[in-house]
Amino acid sequence: MFSYIFVHLFKSGKDKMENELHRIDNHTLNDVLNRSNEVDPKLYDRYLLNKAIDEPAYTILIMMYSFLIILGTLGNLLVIVAVFRKPAMRSPRNLFIVNLAVADLLLCTVTMPLTLMEILTKYFPLGNNPFVCKTIGILQATSTYVSTISITAIALDRYQVIVYPTRENLQLFGAALILLIIWLIAVMLAMPLFIYRHLLHHDLPGMDEAIPSLDFCIENWPIEHGRAYYSIFSLIFQYTLPIIIVSAAYYRISYKLRYRFQAGFVSAEDNLQKNRRQELRGRRLQRTNLLLSSIAIIFCISWLPLNLFNLIADLSPDSNKFSSQPMKVCYAICHMMGMSSACSNPILYGCLNENFWKEFKDILCIEKDGDDVGRPSQRNSVRKKCQNSLLKPDLMTDATNYPQCNTGSTDLTVLTKC
């Protein structure tokens, strides 16, 4: 009976109902007719085409997601190639940035396309595959957790280097162990979505071959408001704690750098050269503060709308209100803002990093030939610097190797090159 009623709710034409009058009583027929009149006449076409959103929003969302996917994929691939193409770039601390790029690459190539699929479709389009349904949920959550935890790990690592420069430097084995822990934590945090995500399969023989069956990939939590509890849990561990740790670490770094610069630069050089050095350090400090502030602010702004939307939707007593087309579009916008961090991270951690920026220009063949004309001494100086950098296994130069009189300048160099 469910299949029969479901068919006639989507086929609102009464002529096809009359052919089946002998199979149901008058009471059931009247109920079906009354309910079919309340159904949107376009609903059957939406199920037939498996489209949850009408034009032009459908095409616009595909275009916007495609732009973010392509931009984020290219940016993060550039970061990964920049590290692995040269041995000098394969430092322990650069592995954190590579791990962030890998997580963001998963966001671009896995999470965004799958989420777009869920937004645009009325039912699960990948067929009766329960394992695929479960895997999609854990992949989406794991890549998100790895990205945010990696950002937190980078902030803590820079905090340790700048605030406690005399401590032992991070080695390759230690960095690899931390990365393994990051992925294990992310998988554990995302595991509830694998456990409680289920596929509902409905056969619809009355639909002939148009829609033979429907599959819905849903979350079936064992307790009431289970989804809301998990949203609060995710809000704490995926957003609140990372933003507090990142903000506190970068504020402490900025405070430490300002304190060291106020001590002055001890040198026997004349006042003119000291002023030039102080001006250079001032510009570096301003750039560093801008970088640190941008990381915290962009992280906060990009992920806030999505977390708030999920929390409000899961706590709302009327969940059907959030399944309408306008709310789906609103969710898509919030999700794109969160996923935009996968595009901004290569810029924040790559383009504003001196060593990465040099590698990017080399990979993309961006070079100003006019700067080298008539300057053989500068070319030789650059060549010597490159040779020296190749001799050092870690581009994150040990802060203890610098003279104590130039501590502030050293910290800025360390921070912008790590």
Image: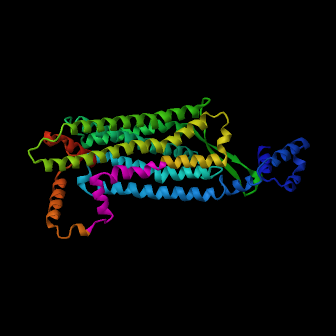
Depth check: 302 or 289 in front? 289
What colouring does the structure picture have?
A: rainbow
Q: Is residue 306 above or below residue 42?
A: above
Q: How many marks?
A: 0
Q: Is residue 128 visible?
A: no
Image position of 166 (left or right of 81) = left
Depth check: 119 or 280 in front? 280
Q: Quadrant of residue 165?
A: top left
Can you name the residue that lies furthest to the top here?
A: 223
Q: Quadrant of residue 45?
A: bottom right
Q: Tell me residue 2's x, y (percent).
A: 77, 43
| Residue in view at x 19 percent, y 43 percent | 398
**What secondary structure characterizes most of the magenta part?**
helix
Q: Tell me residue 65's x, y (percent).
A: 52, 55
- Numbered range of the magenta stretch: 339-368
**Residue 365 colored in magenta in the image:** yes
Image position of 353 (left or right of 17) = left
| Residue in view at x 20 percent, y 49 percent | 393
Q: Tell me residue 137's x, y (percent).
A: 53, 43
Q: Is residue 52 visible?
A: yes
Q: Tell me residue 74's x, y (percent).
A: 41, 58
**Residue 329 colored in magenta in the image:** no
Image position of 181 (left or right of 236) = left
Can you name the residue that lies furthest to the front here?
A: 271
| Residue in view at x 24 percent, y 40 percent | 170
Q: Considering the image in quadrants, where does the N terminus appear? A: top right
Can you name the residue that lies furthest to the left here?
A: 268
